[in-house]
Image: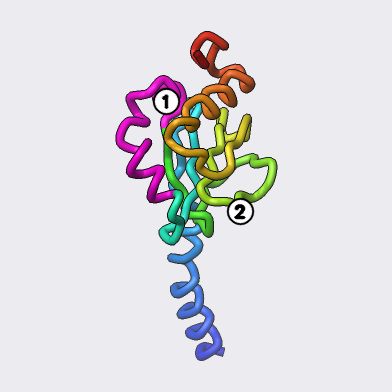
Amino acid sequence: MSRRLAILSALSLAILPGLARAQGPAPDWQAHPWQMMMVGSDSCHYCRRWQAEIGPGYAASVAGRAAPLFQVDVDGPYPDGLALDRRPRITPSFILLSQGTERGRVEGYVGQAHFYPVLTAMMARAGLLSADAVR
């Protein structure tokens, strides 16, 4: 019986760190009730283009100030407690969250010229930005 207990203990020690990582980082919804989750992949060419073309200025943009961005790999881990319409499968995907609940989504990278108009239109539809901010 003690050998079985030792094996179970060893297995739990091997599994628990993975479970802890699977929970992912917890966004601070009190500090930022609206947040943008970018779902990407290291192998995604369009994710790298977004990082080069949009990423450096996102935080200073109207959209970035309204919904700070955090990034998640398409394979996870995802933060606990998210209420998404469906699991993201396209990278990059930009998911607008209010207190962890999905309020809008842009799938794919539409390019530098169209990214902010598409994103701010989604934010206006969700009630985060006024229609004036879209222009």
Q: Residues within 10 Å of mark 2 (few under 14, many from 20)?
A: few
Quote the CA–CA distance across marks 1 and 2.
28 Å
User: Does label 1 or label 2 sit earlier along the sequence?
Assistant: 1
What crowding class fits label 1: few (fewer than 14 Cα within 10 Å), some (14-19), or many (20 or more)?
Answer: few
Dot 1 lies on which element?
Answer: loop
Residue pictured at 63% horizontal, 20% vertical: 125
Q: Nearer the viewer, residue 124 or 110?
A: 110
Write the residue at 42% across / 40% down. 70
Q: Residue at label 2?
A: 89
Drawn side of residue 3 relative to residue 64, left or right: right
Give, as a three-letter code, the residue at label 1: Ala
Of circles 1 and 2, which is in front? 2
- Outermost residue toward the right in this view: 85
Spot occupied by residue 59 in the image (x, y as percentages of width and height): 35, 29
In the visual, does 96 lie left or right of 56? right
Q: Position of residue 130 (x, y in %)?
A: 55, 11
In the rendered image, residue 20, in percent from the top left (x then y), is placed at 46, 59
**Rendered residue at 47%/49% (across/down):** 72
* Residue 69 on image: x %, y %: 42, 35
Find residue 31 and report its image quarter: top left
User: Of 113 and 66, which appears nearest the observer?
Assistant: 113
Q: Is 63 on the left or on the right of 105, as rendered?
A: left
Q: Going 43% across and 45% down the picture, which residue do you hit?
A: 71
Looking at the rendered structure, the secondary structure element under dot 2 is: loop
Q: Amino acid at mark 2?
A: Arg
Please, what is the dominant secondary structure of the magenta stretch? helix
Q: Which residues are magenta?
A: 47-68
Q: Is residue 52 magenta?
A: yes
Please name the residue that numbered disc 1 is placed on.
31
